[in-house]
């Protein structure tokens, strides 16, 4: 299913109006972005284990509630909005995994399947909490590379959209993407070895 994108100017104008506190701006914005947000939620949930207690609609709703509570964001454009939304969805899933992990002492930690483009792991699944720790460590080492992973892998943004959000060239995004994949592979392997 192809998502029909609204003219970037219309979405950007509504985002700025929402940032400025204009009444009704968010209500006019959400129908324009709903299909893309649902696509993001489905992407996230497709990477989760079978039988996950959250459904894409619940993930979207929880992220939306957090988005409404986000104050003081100076929205740049549609890509920036999707990047923030993707990050909020990831945080919802990580929080959910942590709460279940505490209840079950880590035995039922959520797992996420990574596509082959991110890292070449012998295992096809990855612990979401381990991925979150690896991304936090990557952000400490190179914040931009971590943002590239969030935007590309979790946000589903293209190289060009990622470059636009980060205010860098597409070539820089491609380079950061390659380096981040290598870094994450090394970190995740180290986490796995430390557990054994």
Image (cartoon, rainbow, N blue to C red):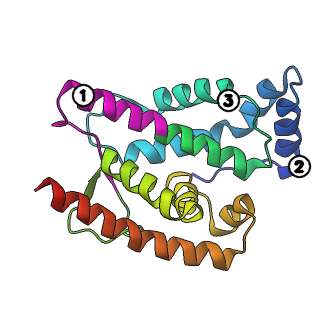
Q: How far apart are the two marked residues, 3 and 2, measured between alpha carbons?
A: 22 Å
* Residue 186 sits above or below residue 40 on the image: below
Residue with the mark numbered 2: 9
Helix, strand or loop at label 2? It is helix
175 relative position to 193: left or right: right
Q: Position of residue 36 (x, y in %)?
A: 63, 44
33 relative position to 57: left or right: right
Q: How far apart are the two marked residues, 1 and 2, measured between alpha carbons?
A: 45 Å
Say few, some or many: other residues with alpha carbon within 10 Å of mark 2 (under 14 / 14 to 19 / 20 or more).
few
Comes first in the chain, label 1 or label 3: 3
Q: Looking at the image, which residue is at 87% across and 20% down?
A: 23
Residue with the mark numbered 1: 102
Residue with the mark numbered 3: 70
Comes first in the chain, label 1 or label 2: 2
Marks 3, 2: nearer the viewer: 3
Circles 1 and 2, Cβ within 8 Å, touching? The answer is no
Q: How far apart are the two marked residues, 1 and 3, measured between alpha carbons?
A: 27 Å
Q: Position of residue 68 (x, y in %)?
A: 67, 25
Q: Quadrant of residue 143?
A: bottom right
Give the magenta-colored segment's residue range: 91-113
Q: Quadrant of residue 158?
A: bottom right
Circles 1 and 3, Cβ within 8 Å, touching? The answer is no
Q: Quadrant of the C terminus?
A: bottom left
142 relative position to 81: left or right: left
Residue 149 vs residue 34, the one in the foreground: 149
Can see residue 79? yes
Say few, some or many: other residues with alpha carbon within 10 Å of mark 3 (under 14 / 14 to 19 / 20 or more).
few
Q: Looking at the image, which residue is at 72% across and 28% down?
A: 71
Can see residue 117? no
Q: Position of residue 186 (x, y in %)?
A: 31, 70
């Amino acid at each position: 299913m192809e998502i029909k994108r609204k003219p970037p100017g219309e979405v950007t104008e509504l985002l700025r109006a929402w940032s400025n506190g204009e009444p009704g701006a968010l209500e006019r914005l959400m129908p324009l972005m709903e299909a893309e947000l649902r696509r993001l939620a489905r992407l996230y949930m497709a990477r989760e284990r079978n039988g996950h207690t959250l459904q894409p609609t619940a993930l979207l709703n929880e992220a939306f509630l957090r988005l409404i509570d986000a104050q003081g964001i100076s929205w740049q454009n549609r890509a920036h909005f999707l990047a923030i939304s993707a990050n909020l969805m990831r945080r919802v899933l990580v929080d959910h995994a942590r709460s279940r992990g505490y209840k079950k002492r880590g035995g039922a930690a959520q797992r996420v399947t990574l596509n082959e483009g991110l890292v070449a792991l012998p295992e096809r699944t990855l612990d979401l909490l381990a991925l979150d720790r690896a991304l936090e460590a990557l952000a400490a080492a190179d914040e931009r590379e971590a943002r590239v992973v969030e935007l590309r892998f979790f946000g589903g943004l293209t190289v060009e959209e990622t470059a636009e959000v980060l205010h860098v060239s597409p070539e820089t995004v491609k380079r950061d993407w390659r380096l981040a994949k290598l870094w994450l592979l090394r970190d995740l392997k180290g986490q796995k070895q430390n557990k054994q």
